[in-house]
Image (spheres, rainbow, N blue to C red):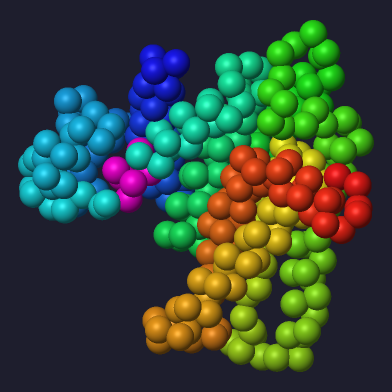
Amino acid sequence: MVFPVLFFLALGAILGSFLNVAIHRLPRHQSVVSPPSTCPACGARILPYDNLPLLSFILLRGRCRHCSAKISPRYPLVEALTALCTAGLYGLLGLNLSLAIYLPFTWALIALAFIDAEHQILPDRITLPGIALSALVPLLGSLRRVAWSPGVARLSVEEWGLGILLGGGIPYLVAAAYRLAQFRKLPAERIDGMGMGDVKMLAMVGGFLGWKLVLLTILVGSVLGSLWGLSGVALSRYGMKQALPFGTFLAVGAFIALAGGPILLAWYAGISGFPE
């Protein structure tokens, strides 16, 4: 049991290092494959022994070897978080086909969360392939002889399609209503609400998790975003009109829905009388 956990921790840390490249480059419309990683401050190429997940940050004391510029704490944070989520998902789902499907989904959520937090965009280069990849959920889940974790439901094609429809449709209608409400305002006075990036991200989430859990994702993400926004206003960090990275909170909500959604749905069904 110890060796598989260590393996998935190491795998997650390595993938976290790659996610850091994606988080830095995708908003800048750069390739995530080439050129090799360089220091953002001095442009010096980062050598392999300075690019070891987590370890290099500690050995270099959080600074570039060449120019001594500080390395963003986001780098070790993403690597550690990806390692923990990867190993945690293995512990939750076990070693089966569902793990192979939901690990890339989790890695995509982490990348989207940090990109939206830094740039307030959700790149199509993640969400659109994610929607396409979600088609594997009903396809492979329908193979009854294939090992599938009891921790996640086998989605039918109808549940998958409805998940995408509701996941993308609800935020699209909210965004349309928000823009309609501001129609009479001058362009300079208008405030952007939910964007199309959120629409495509939630369509991806709906494809992977189904319609019930995408609704839970929206609920949890909205609550977390509201609490964060209200705390920011209370602490005078920003005003009521400050835009929030909603995709970051949706990513957290989606992982909560993936990890604990079936339990939460069963609890709600028990107290409400509605079927799961």
Q: Residue at x 62, y 53 (%)?
A: 253
Q: Is residue 250 visible?
A: yes
Q: Extreme top residue here?
A: 145
Q: Could you say which is closer to the camera, residue 108 or residue 142? A: 142
Q: Could you say which is closer to the camera, residue 197 or residue 62? A: 62
Q: Residue at x 40, y 86 (%)?
A: 236
Prevailing SS of the magenta stretch: helix
Q: Residue at x 54, y 31 (%)?
A: 89
* Looking at the image, residue 13 lies above or below residue 146: below
Residue 7 % position (x, y): 40, 19
Stretch in magenta: 74-79
Which image quadrant: the C terminus? Answer: top right
Which image quadrant: the N terminus? Answer: top left
* Looking at the image, residue 11 lies above or below residue 182: above
- Give the image quarter of residue 11: top left
Q: Residue at x 71, y 19 (%)?
A: 148
**On the rendered structure, is 196 left or right of 112?**
right
130 drawn magenta? no
Q: Could you say which is closer to the camera, residue 266 or residue 121? A: 266
Q: Is residue 121 visible?
A: no
Residue 204 % position (x, y): 70, 43
Residue 69 % position (x, y): 13, 52
- Give the image quarter of residue 273: bottom right
* Looking at the image, residue 238 lies above or below residue 78: below
**On the rendered structure, is 197 left or right of 74?**
right
The number of numbered badges drawn on the structure is 0
Q: Extreme front residue here?
A: 271
76 drawn magenta? yes
